[in-house]
Amino acid sequence: MDALKQLICFAWEQTLACIFPVVIFASLAFTQSVSFTFLPRYDCLLVIFLLMQWWMVYSGMETKDELKVITLFHLIGLALEIFKVHMGAWAYPEKGYFKILGVPLYSGFMYASVASYLCQSWRRLRVELVRWPPFLIVVTLALAIYLNFFIHHYWLDVRWWLTGLVVIVFWRSWVIYEVNGIRYRMPLTLSFVLIGFFIWIAENIATLFGAWKYPNQTGSWRLVHLGKVSSWVLLVIVSFLIVATLKQIKERKEADEVRVSESK
């Protein structure tokens, strides 16, 4: 019964951390079944997501620092979307006023929602990192993974080499989290895989609701290839590394400010 209670508490905290992704899925389903004559669907989604983001900050569910991180992910995701659509990886066939090179602006929020989940989980579960690799290695690895999403269209796809590097670099790294006052730990690489798999499930739901379409889904909806899990795992790694690095920079800055104030 204690284990069941802890599992329910963990599921509840994860549900709260997923509030932004849940709103995205609900909005996709709602706008697919209800048409708006005054505004295209993609633009309606943009308005909904902007209002949701404003409400989360206004209500205190997200801090201003977390908003900065989420905005960064919005820009990173939008840049990736523009490139992938240009290369024909997927498409946004519906019309919209707020589009950049065929990509609706709302699409960046789907990447931002991953950052929102990570930030929320970090705070709600009091996440701590054990044996975190050096800053330079983390930044270089994150940059290499992100660039591979672009470069593999023109050169070799080195995702599996990068995956091997991730396993080597984070082999001894653990994530410690708290549920109902009890501390648990998990291998960091396992958390990457689990989050990536659940994002793949979310991707299938999103494409079912017409968020975007892969080439093999233009006629009718089909399950997204299982191989996409590897792409999401790598994207989760990039997201986690960025969030973790920014969190550590902030903690060091706050610690320095405390030391300076105590020395006066």
Image (spheres, rainbow, N blue to C red):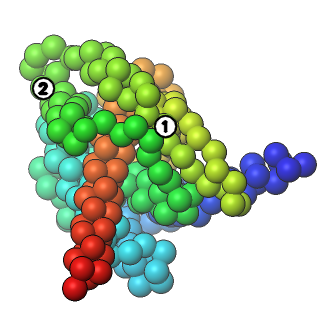
Looking at the rendering, which quadrant does residue 260 occupy? bottom left
Front residue of this view, candidates 49 and 253? 253
- What is the crowding at mark 1: few (fewer than 14 residues within 10 Å), some, or many (at least 20)? some
First in sequence, mark 2 or 1: give its number.
2
Secondary structure beneath label 2: helix
- At horizontal 21% and vertical 17% (from top left) the residue drawn is 157
Secondary structure beneath label 1: strand
Q: Is residue 7 left or right of residue 15?
A: right
Q: Is residue 43 left or right of residue 62?
A: left
The amino acid beneath tag 1 is: Trp
- At horizontal 45% and vertical 41% (from top left) the residue drawn is 130
Point out the frontmost of discs 2 and 1. Answer: 1
Give residue 179's position: percent from left, percent from top. Answer: 67, 56
Front residue of this view, candidates 185 and 48? 185
Looking at the rendering, which quadrant does residue 57 occupy? bottom left
**In the displayed image of the protein, which residue is found farthest to the left?**
154
- At horizontal 27% and vertical 62% (from top left) the residue drawn is 252
Quick check: can you spot residue 49?
A: yes
Tag on residue 151? 2
Q: Is residue 53 left or right of residue 84?
A: right
**In the displayed image of the protein, which residue is found farthest to the right?**
1
The residue that label 1 is drawn on is: 174
- At horizontal 76% and vertical 52% (from top left) the residue drawn is 6
Quick check: can you spot residue 218?
A: no
